[in-house]
Amino acid sequence: MSISQIGRSIGESPTLKLNEKAAILRQKGDPIIHLGGGEPKSKAPIDAILAASAHLNTGEIRYTPADGTIDMKKAIIRYTEEYYNRLVEPENVMASGGAKQAIMVALQAVVNPQEEVIFPAPYWVSYPDMVKLCQGIPVPVLPEDGTFYPRLQDIEQQVGSYTKAVIINSPNNPTGAMYSEQFIAEIVEFCEKRDLYLIMDDIYHRLIFDNRKMINCYDYAKDRTENSKLIVINGVSKQYAMTGFRIGWAVASKKLINVMSNIQSHQTSGPSVLLQKAATGALNGLQSCVENLRITLENNRNIMIDRLNSFEGVKVRQPDGTFYCFADFSAYEKDSMKLSNFLIDKVQVLTVPGIAFGLDGHLRLSYCGSVKDITEGIERMKWALDLNSPNELYIGDRKLVRDWT
């Protein structure tokens, strides 16, 4: 069988694979704890459910415009004005099948073969493969100071004649780091000066902690014309706990949105009318659900960090936002894939190996589940790794005996 070069270069998403594995283990009745998940457990907003139900009852489930329905666009425009203080027109907006598709279509619209796309590491698992799908070259950049907070010079020294775009995800998946206002201001100015596309992946922008304020990239953009190469990506998946609804969007120049919409029209046509109705309901409805989720996540973060700090060999930085922490377990095992598999096999706790995000020796742990899952999951992990723990552990009625050193 002949497989294309692109097809051979792309692997499966490790996070989606873990979700599949967790579902299979649960179906078998195994007492699995999933600390690798990337979706909040709260219900979708009632306004989203009611809007979708009302439209479903009409029976009019039809095609939509490739760039989104009028109501969806109006909701995005209102959201952009409220949270970004930026007034845009319908032609500046494209709704899509999730923020992931919006990023993918943006890359396809601007990246030529062998052109480079730069993004700070650790990075979201899909960025490298998304760039490869465009026949581009992904260029991850680890901060030289060893932190999770990039500096402009980290990015600047990687920019060359083939660089086409920069992707910034803040707050960041997997680290939970919220990049500084100074860095965002500098990267916006730098990309404008160097004529680079800047893709701001803002999917977690309202899920921030410790009384931090959202950082608005538009505040630092000098080019407010239709020549701007700033692309802002967002969606309902994270802040509204609507991961399965698959609605995201992009805000950019009219010319670029037109190109992106043309590409999307041939890929998937327009997003589902039913799911756009739900997303519109969420955006236009009561926003207390977002704040309630944010407060829950901040509390869960505190619990997880407190438990992780009880490990003698774990190093962890307190996340500023999202629902992930990226903990350094290299004192126990430098091969994060090996460590992740060990924890699944021995104590049935799912984590995501750091190598998938560009930094080995780490595990991405999610605190978007229940407090019970967090505390019991970390307890199991500590028992498996800390040789000073008791030799036995009970998981329900099942007794585990440590048979490794």
Image (cartoon, rainbow, N blue to C red):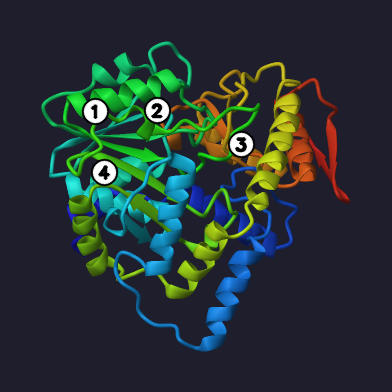
Disc 3/disc 4 C-alpha distance (Å): 26 Å
Q: Residue at x 25, y 61 (%)?
A: 261
Q: Quadrant of the N terminus?
A: bottom left
Say which label, 2 or 3, has the lower sequence index.
2
Disc 1/disc 2 C-alpha distance (Å): 18 Å
367 lies above or below 265: above
In the image, 219: left or right of 261? right
Q: Secondary structure at mark 2?
A: loop
Give the camera-side residue of 241 and 74. 74
Q: Which residue is mark 4?
A: 131
Say which label, 1 or 2, has the lower sequence index.
2
In the image, 161: left or right of 129? left
Give the camera-side residue of 132 and 245. 245
Q: Which residue is mark 1?
A: 191
Residue 313 in the image: state x and y as whole percent. 66, 17
174 lies above or below 276: above
Q: Secondary structure at mark 3?
A: strand
User: Does the CB distance between marks 3 and 4 fall below 8 Å?
Assistant: no
Q: Residues within 10 Å of mark 3 (few under 14, many from 20)?
A: many
In the image, 280: left or right of 240? left
Say which label, 3 or 1, has the lower sequence index.
1
Disc 3/disc 1 C-alpha distance (Å): 32 Å
Closest to the camera, between mark 3 and mark 1, is 1
Q: Secondary structure at mark 4?
A: helix
In the image, 393: left or right of 225? right
Q: Residues within 10 Å of mark 1 (few under 14, many from 20)?
A: some
Q: Residues within 10 Å of mark 4 (few under 14, many from 20)?
A: many
Which three-letter amino acid code belongs to the residue tagged 4?
Answer: Val
Give the camera-side residue of 35 and 152. 152
Say which label, 4 or 1, has the lower sequence index.
4
Q: Which mark is residue 121?
A: 2
